[in-house]
Image: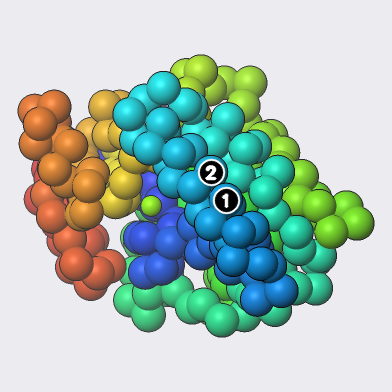
Amino acid sequence: MARLAFLCDFDGTVSPEDIGHNFVMRFSARGDARASDAERREANARLEDLAARWRAGTLGHRELTEAECALLRCDENEAHAFADGFALDPTFAPFAREAQSRGAQVLILSEGFDFYIQAMLARAGLSDLDVASNRVRFERGRVIPEFPHAARSCGRCGNCKGAHARDWRARGYRTVLIGDGYSDRCAARECDVVLARGSLLDWCASERISATGFDSFEGVLDRAREGAA
Ligand SMILES: [Mg+2]
Ligand SMILES: [Zn+2]
């Protein structure tokens, strides 16, 4: 049997919480205790409008991220302190080590940001995992997003997981997607096995993409073996 490559979404999957979303909520005027009520209401309306256009498919993830970051005020120390408040799903590290010991690849693919992904992986002793994500630079209180993987995007994603899935298939791996949301859709179309929850599971059903539900990373290796057999 071909070797397995596990393509793991981060926000809402490896991390139970959607940290990227929380970051935007916290560091826009919406989450700023010093902002006036009017500023908070305006930021809230703009964020809701962006999210609605993204869900409707008229705004790509890269454009969404750029527009959200333009609303944020945060320096690097604040961002790192914020990331300290979150932790990985405790079943993820044991899964990753067991998968690697069996010769599988375990990869984090994310439309979120490097600063919290790397900090959280390091705290879990997983700094060596391969991560492909978007990045941010902090410049005098501004948050500037960067998209190092955008060149191979489908045009909507900032970091298209479908392109990564095609790479791993081309290298001869059986690809297993583990994810929960919109940013996983391109990969769900490309992967050999899909383990899904949340809106991704519903979307796969509506698109007739075969997907299996999951609650945690416990049992994921067995389910991937069944699906890949
Ligand atoms: Mg997610
Ligand atoms: Zn895509």
Residue 5's x, y, as percent? 37, 45
Residue at 36 percent of width and 25 percent of height: 57
Foreground disc of the pair 1, 2: 1
Q: Residues within 10 Å of mark 2 (few under 14, many from 20)?
A: some
Residue 29's x, y, as percent? 64, 61
Are the two marked residues, 1 and 2, in contact with CB atoms closer than 8 angstroms? yes
Residue 168 visible to an observer of this rendering:
no
57 and 122: which is toward the camera = 57
Q: Given the image, on which type of amino acid does mark 2 rest? A: Arg
| In the image, residue 19 above or below residue 3 | below
**Is residue 197 toward the left or the right of residue 98 in the image?**
left
Quarter that holds the C terminus? top left
Q: Disc 1 beta carbon < 8 A from ligand 1?
A: no
Residue 28 placement: quadrant: bottom right
Question: Which residue corresponds to mark 1?
Answer: 42
Residue at 20 percent of width and 54 percent of height: 197
Residue 125's x, y, as percent? 57, 77
Residue at 59 percent of width and 66 percent of height: 37
| In the image, residue 30 above or below residue 203 | below
Q: Residue furthest front?
A: 38
Q: Could you say which disc has been placed on residue 98 in the image? A: none
